[in-house]
Amino acid sequence: MEAKEKEKGLEVDGVVTQALANTRFRVTLDTGHQVIAHVAGRMRKNFIRIVPGDRVKVELSPYDLTRGRITYRER
């Protein structure tokens, strides 16, 4: 039997609008929706700072479209 690959999230762009506690952020997506997103471990490891106003890529969970993970900050 083949090993089932983990479900991939939906990758969307957005703008950070508010910084919340515990490295979480409120992000307004380009579609107009708002989600709560946390910083990916790789970004935290490399000390990449995120502030309100930054454009980011967010990977949304396929199970809960109101939560996601910030995977990239655009310069």
Image (spheres, rainbow, N blue to C red):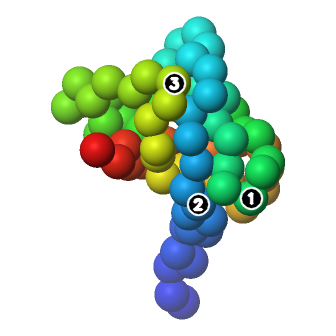
Badge 2 vs badge 1, beta-carbon distance below 8 Å: yes
Whole-percent x, y for residue 11 in the image: 56, 63
Circle 1 residues within 10 Å: few <14, some 14–19, many ≥20: few
- The residue where tag 3 is placed is 52
Horizontally, is 19 left or right of 70 in the view?
right
> Outermost residue toward the left?
46
Q: Nearer the viewer, residue 5 or 42?
A: 42
Q: Secondary structure at mark 1?
A: loop
Q: Amino acid at mark 3?
A: Pro
**On the rendered image, what quadrant is the C terminus found in?**
top left
Vertical placement of 31 versus 7: above or below?
Answer: above
Circle 3 residues within 10 Å: few <14, some 14–19, many ≥20: few
Q: Is residue 66 visible?
A: yes
Q: Earlier in the sequence, mark 3 or mark 2?
A: 2
Badge 1 vs badge 3, beta-carbon distance below 8 Å: no
Vertical placement of 61 versus 24: above or below?
Answer: below
Q: Name the disc covering residue 31, or none.
A: 1
Whole-percent x, y for residue 44 in the image: 32, 28
Vertical placement of 44 versus 20: above or below?
Answer: below
